[in-house]
Amino acid sequence: MFKIVEDFIAGFSSWVWDWPLLVLLIGGGVFFLIYSRFTPFFYFKHAINVLRGKYDNEHAPGELSHFQALSSAIAATVGMGNISGVAVAIVAGGPGAVFWMWISALIGMATKFYTCSLAVMYRSEDEGGSLLSGPMYVITKGLGTQWKPLAVLFALAGLVGTLPAFTANQLTQTLVDVLDWNDDYKWYIGIVLAGFASLVIMGGIKRIGVVASRLVPFMVVLYFITVITILVLQIEKIPDMFMLIFSDAFSGKAAAGGALGYLIKTGVKRAAFSNEAGIGTAPMMHGTAKTNEPIREGLVAMIGPAIDTLLVCTLTALAILSTGVWQNSNDNGISLTLEAFNSVLPYGLGDIVVVVMVLVFGLSTLFSYSHYGTTCLGFLTKPKYGKYYNYLYIVSIIIAAVVKIEFAINLIDSAFAIMAIPTVVSGLLLAPRVNARAKMYFEKYKV
């Protein structure tokens, strides 16, 4: 029975991630980039100043500071998608897939600017006065109730897409690989992970924001130092690795069947999982920021793809490619990344570093994703019932710990594809309103 479900999900994932969806994501992103007159790149310095707290207003409506909102969103994206997802992309599509991840991220910065600005413009409140945000509220408040079926589609897909299938799976696999345990222990690891996650997510969005704002800077710096160390030890190979990425990006020789189209799709899919630009999860977090200026949060949000894909994913890719393990291994996902680290770092240091990083990355992702699911369930029912999603979420951590990585990937990819349609469509239709608001904002603050 489960085999039938696996095959169906695999087939659906392959079908839905075909050219129409890629055209929507990439084409939509290119439209946002040109229509914004390249705002993400011209106002990047201002976005950093906002992130630093220069424009913070404690009396503004919202739950999280700009820094906490970005940290929470990044906690969900700079996670297993960056350590494990890059390895999956290289195994599936070859080194050239990394190039298409870069392209997707650059375009995704503009997509994030629009979708997250809209999330603040059209956020709502629950009975207790807490803010509610996300593509479903953008659709119903910005486009009107006649568009509600599109909002419902997003929320339904979001209940699946925000499950911790991939994260819990790879987090468990890391511990099993490092500790040399057999697969029977995965159940116990899943139970322990579920226990840890419940301590944070049951505390709601504010506790998630506080924990994420403390974990994210630590995990990014630790990962950066570790991978830079590996790259320094392999420094003579780095130029060749960049050449390999660029040359393979257009040849598609390393991709299945040598198909360039397959290579592009692989890169875009993995980038979508890495930075979530156009998927619609990040707007649910950024929409809770303490601000009266939607454009300000949109500018902060666009920093996300730059950090998690252009920086962190690139470091991971170079570490894997420079060690050469991707050519001589049957491993995939986190197991391949672990093998790459161990091939360079001495005395089992790779095991220790990867375990620490995966625990921090994985747990921070588990914390943030729960908020997305509760928001989706709250929209479909009533906001006060959204918290019950956490119980399903905690149980799913245990189940995800023992399923195959291919099933976890296909399940999340399928849900993300469906979520992208309402997110990008609503963003395109409401883009003129963002531009009008942006013009007023930039004139007001003379930036």
Image (spheres, rainbow, N blue to C red):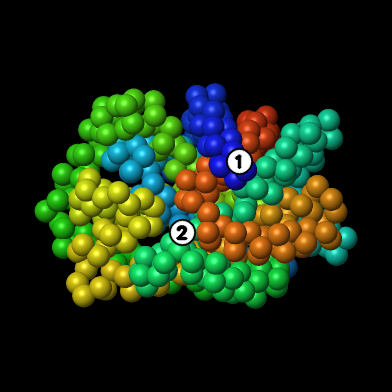
Check disc 1 and report its element: helix, strand or loop: helix
Amino acid beneath label 1 = Val
Location of residue 214 in the rendering, given as x and y in whole percent from the top left corner: 52, 73
For marks 1 and 2 on the same chain, the one whose residue lies earlier in the sequence: 1
Location of residue 189 in the rendering, given as x and y in whole percent from the top left corner: 52, 70
Residue, x 39% and y 46% (percent of image)? 88
Q: Residue furthest front?
A: 1
Residue, x 69% and y 54% (percent of image)? 373
Q: Which of the two marks, 1 or 2, is nearer to us in this view?
A: 1
Q: Compute the Cα span from label 1 to label 2.
A: 21 Å
Q: Which residue is mark 1?
A: 5
Amino acid beneath label 2 = Gln
Location of residue 332 in the rendering, given as x and y in whole percent from the top left corner: 36, 50
Question: In the depicted view, which residue is nearer to us: 247 or 176?
Answer: 176
Q: Residue furthest left?
A: 236
Q: Quick check: 161 above or below 258?
A: below
Q: Which residue is mark 2?
A: 170
| Left or right side of 286 for 334 | left
Q: For the residue carrying disc 1, how many other residues have a C-alpha within 10 Å: few (<14), some (14-19), or many (20+)?
A: few
User: Looking at the image, do the residues carrying marks 1 and 2 touch, with CB atoms under 8 Å apart?
Assistant: no
Residue, x 55% and y 67% (percent of image)? 187
- Say whether residue 223 is visible: yes
| Left or right side of 317 for 391 | right
Q: For the residue carrying disc 2, how many other residues have a C-alpha within 10 Å: few (<14), some (14-19), or many (20+)?
A: many
Question: Number of numbered discs present?
Answer: 2
Q: Quick check: 418 above or below 160?
A: above
